[in-house]
Amino acid sequence: MIITVAGNKKEYNDGITVAQLIEQEKVETPQYVTVSLNDEFVENTNFETTALKDGDNVEFLYFMGGGQ
């Protein structure tokens, strides 16, 4: 199946979960990543159970603090 990850279309095995995708994509500091699936945020407690489907669009986001 084809999934768009960070703007790039890639092929993955059917039934891959968000957690497995994070691992396969070697996401830096996965404990701090926020995942957007088809423009909806996925709770990190659901990464293991959220299966991706053909045509899904996934973005990995990091919220940064700081400033004055």
Image (tube, rainbow, N blue to C red):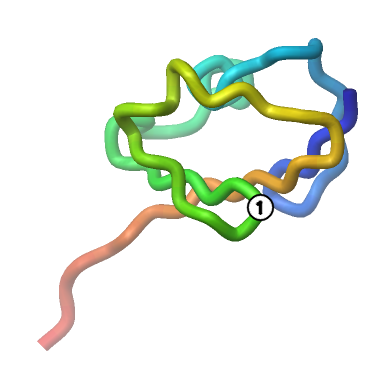
Viewer-side residue, 26 vs 12: 12
Vertical relation: 27 (above or below) 64: above
- The N terminus is located in which quarter? top right
Residue identifier under label 1: 38
**Image position of 16 (left or right of 7):** left
What amino acid does circle 1 point to?
A: Asn
**Residue most toward the bottom?**
68
Q: Percent position (x, y) of residue 41?
A: 46, 52
Report crowding for label 1: few under 14, some 14 to 19, many 20 or more residues within 10 A (C-alpha): few
**Residue at 28% over, 63% down:** 64
Q: Nearer the viewer, residue 36 or 49?
A: 49
In this view, the residue in front, 23 or 48, is 48
Judging depth in this view, the residue of 55 and 12 nearest the camera is 55
Question: Residue placed farthest to the left in the image?
Answer: 68
* Quarter occupied by residue 2: top right
The quadrant the C terminus occupies is bottom left
SS under mark 1: loop
> Compared with residue 7, is residue 28 higher up or lower down, i.e. above or below?
above
Q: Position of residue 21 (x, y in %)?
A: 60, 23
Q: Relative to 44, is 57 above or below? A: below
Q: Residue at x 53, y 50 (%)?
A: 36
